[in-house]
Image (spheres, rainbow, N blue to C red):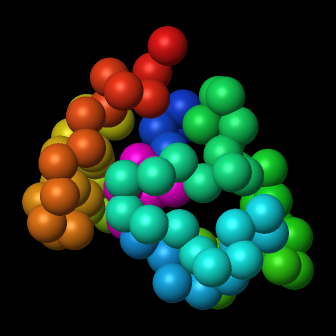
Amino acid sequence: MECRVNCGACCIVPSISSPIPGMPKGKPAGVKCVNLSDDFSCKIFGHPDRPKVCGGFTPEKLVCGDTQKDAFKILSELEGITVNVNDFNN
């Protein structure tokens, strides 16, 4: 599966414990990464400082579903939190 354009669920829903440029203590679950642009693309994609966990994430239907809303729902359930996609879409 290819990464879905304009999704960003993996950059918002899960917690990331490793340092991220602009977020030296990592990122709590349900918080938008500072490196996620308004169009939900990664500003540091391919950059050497991008966390290995981000680079190692492989989109799969099991985790990403068929839509951005599915991805938020599935990842939220896996993280044990509630995150509403509408809170991040303008």
The quadrant where residue 39 appears: top right
- In the rendered view, does 10 fall on the left or right side of 70? right
Q: For the magenta stretch, what is the residue range?
A: 9-14
- Residue 3, position as x, y percentages in the image: 51, 51
Residue at horizontal 25%, vertical 59%?
75
Q: Residue furthest front?
A: 25
Looking at the image, residue 68 lies above or below residue 24: above
Q: Nearer the viewer, residue 33 or 59?
A: 33
Q: Nearer the viewer, residue 10 or 29?
A: 29
Residue at horizontal 32%, vertical 23%?
86
The quadrant where residue 50 appears: bottom right
Regarding residue 2, the answer to whether it shows in the image is no
Q: Residue furthest top?
A: 90
Regarding residue 71, the answer to whether it shows in the image is yes
Magenta span contains residue 10: yes
- Residue 37, position as x, y percentages in the image: 70, 37
Magenta span contains residue 17: no
- Residue 26, position as x, y percentages in the image: 59, 75
